[in-house]
Amino acid sequence: MGGEAPNNVGAGGSILGALTMPLLFIVFMYFLIIRPQRKRQQQHQELVNSVTVGETVTTSGGIVGKVINIKDDEVVIETSVERTQIKIKKWAISDVERLEEE
């Protein structure tokens, strides 16, 4: 009576085939997510490092003020007519309104 087990030749596939899709996925994710994020971080770091006294900045919290002092990783901004001064970290700067050169 033919009680033989089926022959599963080729069902396992090769190791190269098994690693191809995950490797392609990792490469795809690098170019889609990681690389652009690093570029944005570098641009933000350059923006923060180029801030000078007298420029108007906007913080990540939406506070707008004029830079009056820069010290290490902190910036002091003046935010209103009442000359309110706020000390913020440089990483909190989200935008800089450059001074117009005359």
Image (cartoon, rainbow, N blue to C red):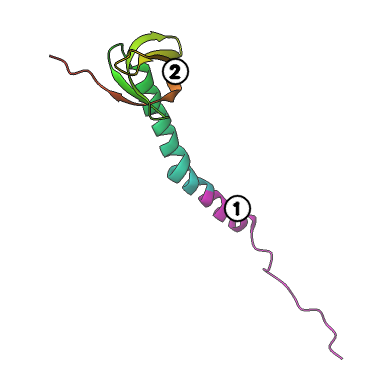
Tell me which residue sits at (42%, 29%) in the image.
61
Residue at position x 52%, y 51% in the image: 25
Q: Which mark is residue 88?
A: 2
Is disc 2 placed on a helix, strand or loop? strand
Residues rendered magenta in the picture: 1-25
Quarter of the image with the C terminus in it: top left
Q: Nearer the viewer, residue 75 or 37?
A: 75
| Residue denoted by label 1 | 19
Q: 33 or 64: which is nearer to us? A: 64
- On the rendered structure, is 74 left or right of 79? right
Q: Is residue 2 left or right of residue 18?
A: right
Q: Residue furthest front?
A: 82
Residue 53 vertical position relative to residue 25 in the rendered view, above or below: above
Residue 40: quarter of image: top left
State whether residue 63 is above or below residue 49: below
Vertical relation: 35 (above or below) 56: below
On the image, the x and y values in percent for residue 70 come to: 38, 10
Q: Residues within 10 Å of mark 2 (few under 14, many from 20)?
A: some
Give x and y (percent) for residue 77. 36, 15
- Image quadrant of residue 21? bottom right
Front position in the image: 26 or 73: 73
